[in-house]
Image (spheres, helix red, strand yellow):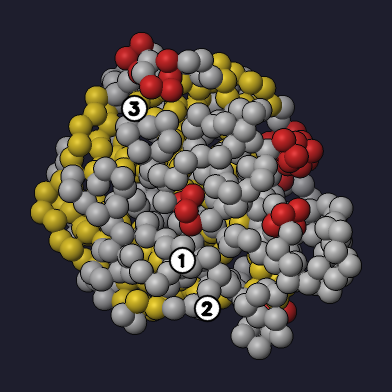
Amino acid sequence: MSGSRCQRGQRGAVAAQRGLAALVVVLLSLGLASCGSSTHTSRSSSQTPHTSSQTSPASSTTSPTVKHAAHAANASMTTVRLTVPAANRSGVFTSAHRLSLPRGWTAEVWALVNAVRFETWTPEHDLLASAPADGTVTLLTPRTGNPGTPPAQRTIISGLRNPQGLAFDRIDGHEVLYVAESDEVDRYAWTGAGVGTRTVLIKGLPDTEPAGDDVHELKDVVVGADHTIYVDVGSSSNASPRDSWHGIPRASVLAYHPNGKLERVWATGVRNGDGLSFAPDGTLWTAVNERDQISYPFHRAYGGTSDAYNHVIEAYVNNHPPDEIARLTPGRDLGWPYCDPDPDVRTGASHTRFRYTNLPFTRDAQTNPTGARLNCSKLSRLQVGLPAHTAPLGFHFLFGSKLPAPWSNGAVVAGHGSWDRHPPRGPAVYWMPWSQSRHTLGAARVLVGGFQEPNGSRWGRVADAVPGPDGALYVADDQAGAIYRIVPTAHH
């Protein structure tokens, strides 16, 4: 399943999705998607989140954005040999591997960074990469005139506690770097070639909770145009009732003043919202790992049982609940653990097709059987679902990047892959189109795949994907300890 244990990145990979092959074909043909970010501020935004709930009706004429989305949905995929420079031929890369990419794209192992997790570009167009397991942040400098050559790299911060999220901002005319550790957010003066003075800006974030059964320690951080700092705080359990840590609610996204003071709890019911990014309209969005081992929530026959209500059935668990891509308007409740998004076209049917946009919520049979905990029918519908146990991590809107259209008119998210699904959900980078008229994302499609072998074994697990200043996509793989440079063609 998707969950927290896979988010923490050091669990052993399980593997392949044989029984899911038909669904993958559907996803590829429909064009299911994910999110990306801009070059300088891949974890910041030039727009401030606003509170309007969106929705101008779709235009009656076909806009360029719609045409681009249709083009992307129909882009054919092919398998491409992963190029490995001699300097990077070690570990898993002593063997040949192939990736699934849009036709005409290429892929290479750009850099080796142990346990690499999240990425962001510096103002000087160098790449920063976090490694929670090593407690480090690494600076990677592309080679002038030859961006495909392995970069120069050096560790610029070490000794941190599970660093993951990275974000730049400019305060009083000076660049600063935010680093989200598992228990705090640090702000560093940026020197142009590294970091200067460190300030522990936000202290005492929920970290290890001994009473929790499924602790989510790692954090992401993004910064709005008004310098508000947004931090995700994962749940301490798979699906236990909500809790807090010294007054800080878990399963939430928090908004902080630039001085480090908590301004408000921006959103709740966010089980594990590791990916945070700002949309073109300025709204804050998140990518969420949903719960595992959900029980069947209807008094109906399912899986050979005449009344399957509250039974944990593998066939149902494999596709429920979907992971989430959601707009976080102030005060939004995403429902966890009391309400679950439902992807069924025929609700509760064993052979239903699935839809992954504008999803309703259903009561969780284990935590909210009567609806007394939370009225699921009153929750705003989920904008986008990802196939259950995708385990989304790094998430970015791509507007302002140099990726060619139609890809720049959308977002990417790194699916880490399931940790206990049977058969496993494979790791992949997904892309989603943005509708300018409706201010929302469309269904996701696989953009980069192939990390999982047909026998179920994995040689890699993607954790992040950010667009580079050269128009390529840089994909972090925390299992293989690598950053891939994915080069698109403007003609596909």
Q: Which residue is mark 1?
A: 213
Q: Give the mark nearest the N terminus, 2 or 1.
A: 1
Q: Nearer the viewer, residue 295 or 57?
A: 295
Residue positioned 44% across, 28% down in the render: 484
From where the camera sits, is residue 387 visible? yes
- How far is the residue under mark 3 from the one under mark 1? 33 Å
* Closer to the eye: label 3 or 2: 2
Where 231 sits versus 424, above or below?
below
- How far is the residue under mark 3 from the one under mark 2? 40 Å
Where 28 sits versus 144, above or below?
below
Name the kind of residue labelled 3 in the image.
Leu
Disc number placed over residue 227 in the picture, else none: none
Where 156 sits versus 225, above or below?
above
Q: Residue furthest front?
A: 305
Q: Residues within 10 Å of mark 3 (few under 14, many from 20)?
A: many
- The location of residue 339, given as percent across then percent down, is 65, 73
* Closer to the eye: label 2 or 1: 1
Q: Give the mark nearest the N terminus, 3 or 1.
A: 3
Check disc 3 and report its element: helix, strand or loop: strand
- The location of residue 120, given as percent across then percent down, is 35, 43
Q: Which residue is mark 2?
A: 241
Q: Nearer the viewer, residue 94 or 103?
A: 94
Q: Is residue 74 left or right of residue 239?
A: right
Residue positioned 11% across, 49% down in the render: 196
Q: Which residue is mark 3?
A: 112
Q: Give the mark nearest the N terminus, 3 or 2.
A: 3
